[in-house]
Amino acid sequence: MTNYQNLLKSYGLKTTFQRLSILKSIDIAGHITIDDIHKDILTNHPSLSLATVYNNILKMQNIGVVVEVPISGKKSKYELIKDDHIHLICQKCGSVVDKDINCDVEQIFDKISVENNFVLLSTQNNLYGVCKDCIY
Amino acid sequence: MTNYQNLLKSYGLKTTFQRLSILKSIDIAGHITIDDIHKDILTNHPSLSLATVYNNILKMQNIGVVVEVPISGKKSKYELIKDDHIHLICQKCGSVVDKDINCDVEQIFDKISVENNFVLLSTQNNLYGVCKDCIY
DNA sequence: TCTTTATTAATAAAAATTATTATCTAAGGA
DNA sequence: TCCTTAGATAATAATTTTTATTAATAAAGA
């Protein structure tokens, strides 16, 4: 995991156990809901308030450390900032797996953006289906 | 707009003024939130219940007529079912514009899916940025 | 028109998110 | 190390969003 302590500091956010725990929880899970972050941290820090998770997720979203992954029909999950990529989202088990985005795809997205005078900042590419473990 | 009356009937959903109004509202707007559908229809049908909008959006999602478009940091919008496509989402004004998805992109998505034994059913491709009307 | 069954409106209930505030803690300076 | 202070947390309340309930209503076929 990147040095989030410095990253937080550079945006004027103090390094707290709660924030580092949230980042760690997201990092380990890859993609995780607010509720599950809360449950996760509660196991060794029983006083963590759910509101603290909400507040910090929001703040860390604003400074760009954390990214919301909204998923059709389900609750949003959160991931750490990373290069644009593809999500394979299983509609049976809910798993989310990252895959690299092909350069060709990026170029096409850039082209479409230019054609429409659209200033492209980021992309979210959700592929919905059934993962290999849920086919049978 | 397609013949939604028959489509509803084929799934055992009765054709009601409310349902047709919701479909029409989505069709005209292209992409619209639950709240805005409600507000929209209220103007000439003041008794429409918000719960009715929620219930019907859910039912029409289940039969595949309506699709949720979840948007990072904002409320979901809804669109009518259509072929996979790209969304240009303006982070300033919130506008959502559809663009055709390139065949090459579809092929790459198919390839990635096959490589991962993933049964691909649909995709949502959100390009976030600033639209031409909001640049200045 | 009548009958059946699903749908709606209205409301209540539940779930999710945000706001408030007293207490507490991180971080820098003495 | 010991203040000091600004910001953070926990606890809770308030708000917003979504879902469930039910009596009244309307659609669709006989």
Image (cartoon, coloured by chain):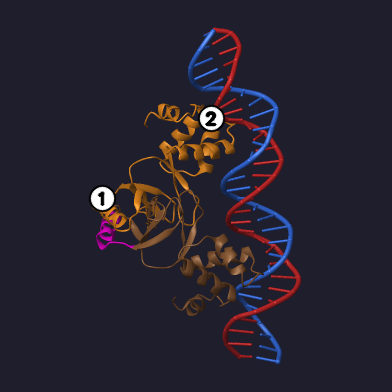
Chain colours: A orange, B brown, C blue, D red
The answer to whether residue B70 is above or below residue B82 is above
Return the chain for callout 1.
A
Residue A92 placement (x, y as % from top left):
44, 56
* Image quadrant occupied by the N terminus of chain B: bottom left
Q: Are marks 2 and 1 in contact (CB under 8 Å)?
A: no
Residue A111 placement (x, y as % from top left):
27, 55
Mark 2: amino acid = Asn
Is residue B24 shown to the viewer in this render? yes
Q: Is residue A95 left or right of residue D13?
A: left
Q: Which residue is mark 2?
A: A44
Camera-side mark, 2 or 1: 1
Return the chain for callout 2.
A
- Mark 2 or mark 1, which has the lower sequence index? 2
The answer to whether residue A3 is above or below residue B88 is above
Between the residue at mark 2 and the residue at mark 1, the CA separation in whole angstroms equals 40 Å
How dense is the environment of label 2, judged by Cα within 10 Å: few (below 14), some, or many (20 and up)?
few
Mark drawn on residue A102: 1
Instruction: Please say whether residue B31 is one of the residues in the magenta stretch.
Output: no
How dense is the environment of label 1, judged by Cα within 10 Å: few (below 14), some, or many (20 and up)?
some
Q: Secondary structure at mark 2?
A: loop
Mark drawn on residue B30: none
Magenta span: B100-113
Dominant SS in magenta: helix
Mark 1: amino acid = Asn
Residue A9 placement (x, y as % from top left):
44, 27
Residue A54 placement (x, y as % from top left):
54, 40
* Residue at image coords 27%, 58%: B105
Q: Residue furthest front?
A: B136
